[in-house]
Image (cartoon, rainbow, N blue to C red):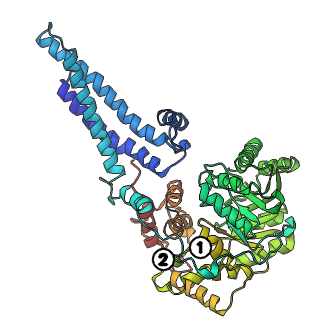
């Protein structure tokens, strides 16, 4: 016996609510992160449909279309099925009665009810956190990221910093480039402000620009491309990465795939060649020495589109990667996380790179987590910390330059104020105090001592680095995206027996930090 129109409606409302709270909520949550269409089933088709429906919106729409499409599909089913049920029931009572309007009204009501139920469940779970174990949804993070007032740079633009220029140049290894001691990191720039920052930095003597396709979702390369117009091409050194706007190219990428990524970068940058291409964030020797990447580089170099090859790393496998790079003799530059209080063995690797292969060495992550603006007991020293940290790097004769992310015009003055200087006693005191205050929260790059203690094989270093991006770098969206992309995250840590306890040589309370990281970076648990 067929269900009545009312029972059919109620059944479909339940189905819509279930789909809204699971499937739709899951993909709506992923869409809020801003993930590439490749993260979704039929992602490119969904993205194309979204662009057709919402022309002019230059954002990832695949997840939104998938989530809303599932609810609309249920609503359409509800309309036609309930309309049919209603018309059949009316026909049995009075076969001569016109029931088209009554059936359509019933179907429309069912469609609206399922859409409200499904949409409400989707928003309730993904936005407000209803039904989540931690009760966390996107409402809080979106308010904090886009609605809250956060201190992204020093509140006072010191008069003493104004007009600062590069005061020292070194040698970028066998490239023979006379590199400024402070160079421009462009990971957080885009648009008109980004273009202005790059131009001012170049005018002040910075002559090395570090960019990548996946910095600011192509925005970095586009801003750099606008900025360099009008400057002689041989007046600056331009570095990019073997990446797409989605992420790093894996080992085994075809030669043409590697070459196309660089061709796309050249188009965005508006130039005929780049000086340097990095195998970026490299944590595997296989990716470092992938024959295809070296063949692609050889072809690009022969075509005059690239001059030098480099690699970057800030992973626990850095020692293996760096040693393999040095032994191979194929790399002209290496870019590694290097700052005060870092793993002592890194200095020996840097010295090897310089003495054995004459490689240029670029120090990144120079502010050691950038926590100085958020430390309650560091208020008196916070205005001098960035300069002290940069001076520490400048004081190492084996380091060619320090790259640091500029995302405000003030940074040109603030960071170049340290150019040409080495640390003095008061600078070292500032750095020592910073180390004391961050000793139980800062996860040192290249360490990895704790990783073998985790029975779930969670990348503890990656999780804590993404937390650092959120809390200290104020790169909230990037941190959430990177955390979402991890194969294994910290969701298992709360119920774990914590065999990692005591394994950190720096004294980090790993389980506590990991549980906090998951709460911070997971606005809602993906529906299972």
Quick check: 269 above or below 314? above
Q: Quadrant of residue 354?
A: bottom right
Q: Secondary structure at mark 2?
A: helix
Q: Reading the chain from its start, which is encountered first: label 1 or label 2?
A: 2
Q: Position of residue 511 (x, y in %)?
A: 45, 71
| Residue at image location 41% in from the left, 45% down from the top | 28
**The label number, if any, that marks residue 263 in the structure image:** none
Q: Residues within 10 Å of mark 1 (few under 14, many from 20)?
A: few
| Residue at image location 76% in from the left, 45% down from the top | 259
Q: Which residue is mark 2?
A: 374
Q: Which residue is mark 1?
A: 449
Q: Residue lying furthest bottom in this view? A: 425
From the viewer's perspective, tell me whether residue 271 is left or right of residue 155.
Answer: right
From the viewer's perspective, tell me whether residue 355 is left or right of residue 24.
Answer: right
Q: Residue lying furthest top in this view? A: 96
For the residues labelled 1 and 2, the Cα–Cα distance comes to: 27 Å
Identify which residue, 487 or 88, lies in the foreground.
Answer: 88
Identify which residue, 85 or 494, lies in the foreground.
Answer: 85
| Residue at image location 32% in from the left, 41% down from the top | 119
Q: Position of residue 112 (x, y in %)?
A: 27, 33
Label count reads 2
Q: Secondary structure at mark 1?
A: loop
Residue 453 visible in the snapshot: yes
Identify which residue, 420 or 201, lies in the foreground.
Answer: 201
Q: Position of residue 209 (x, y in %)?
A: 72, 62
Q: Quadrant of residue 512?
A: bottom left
């Amino acid at each position: 016996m067929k269900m009545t129109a009312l029972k059919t409606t109620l059944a479909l409302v339940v189905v819509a609510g279930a789909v809204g709270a699971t499937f739709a909520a899951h993909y709506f949550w992923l869409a809020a992160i801003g993930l590439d269409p490749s993260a979704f089933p039929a992602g490119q088709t969904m993205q194309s449909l979204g662009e057709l429906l919402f022309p002019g919106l230059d954002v990832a729409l695949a997840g939104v279309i998938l989530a809303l499409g599932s609810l609309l599909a249920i609503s359409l089913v509800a309309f036609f099925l309930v309309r049919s049920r209603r018309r059949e029931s009316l026909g049995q009572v009075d076969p001569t009665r016109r029931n088209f309007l009554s059936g359509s009204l019933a179907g429309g009501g069912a469609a609206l009810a399922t859409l409200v139920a499904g949409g409400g469940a989707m928003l309730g779970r993904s936005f407000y956190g209803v039904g989540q174990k931690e009760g966390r949804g996107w409402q809080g993070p979106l308010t904090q990221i886009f609605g809250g007032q956060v201190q992204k740079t020093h509140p006072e633009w010191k008069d003493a910093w104004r007009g600062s220029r590069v005061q020292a140049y070194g040698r970028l290894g066998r490239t023979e480039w006379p590199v400024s001691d402070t160079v421009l990191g462009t990971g957080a720039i885009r648009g008109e402000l980004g273009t202005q920052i790059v131009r001012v930095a170049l005018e002040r003597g910075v002559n090395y620009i570090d960019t990548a396709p996946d910095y600011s979702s192509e925005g970095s390369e586009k801003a750099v491309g606008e900025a360099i117009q009008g400057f002689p091409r041989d007046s600056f050194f331009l570095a990019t990465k073997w990446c797409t706007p989605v992420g790093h190219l894996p080992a085994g990428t075809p030669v043409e795939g590697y070459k196309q990524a660089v061709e796309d970068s050249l188009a965005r940058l508006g130039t005929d060649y780049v000086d340097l291409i990095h195998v970026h964030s490299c944590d595997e020797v296989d990716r470092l020495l992938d024959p295809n990447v070296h063949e692609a580089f050889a072809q690009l170099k022969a075509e005059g589109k690239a001059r030098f090859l480099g690699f970057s790393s800030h992973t626990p496998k850095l020692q293996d990667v760096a040693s393999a790079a040095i032994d191979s003799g194929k790399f002209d530059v290496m870019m590694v996380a290097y700052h005060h209080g870092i793993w002592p063995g890194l200095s020996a690797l840097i010295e090897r790179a310089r003495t054995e292969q004459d490689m240029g060495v670029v120090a990144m992550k120079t502010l050691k987590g950038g926590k100085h603006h958020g430390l309650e007991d560091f208020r008196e020293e916070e205005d001098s910390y960035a300069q002290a940290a940069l001076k520490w790097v400048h004081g190492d004769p084996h380091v060619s330059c320090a790259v640091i992310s500029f995302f405000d015009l003030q940074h040109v003055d603030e960071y170049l104020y340290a150019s040409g200087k080495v640390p003095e006693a008061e600078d070292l005191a500032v750095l020592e105090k910073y180390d004391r205050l961050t000793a139980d929260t800062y996860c040192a790059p290249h360490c990895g001592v704790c990783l073998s203690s985790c029975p779930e094989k969670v990348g503890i270093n990656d999780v804590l680095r993404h937390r650092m991006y959120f809390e200290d770098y104020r790169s909230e969206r990037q941190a959430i995206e990177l955390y979402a992309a991890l194969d294994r995250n910290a969701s298992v840590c709360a119920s774990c027996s914590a065999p990692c306890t005591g394994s950190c040589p720096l004294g980090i309370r790993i389980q506590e930090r990991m549980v906090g990281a998951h709460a911070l970076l997971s606005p809602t648990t993906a529906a299972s």
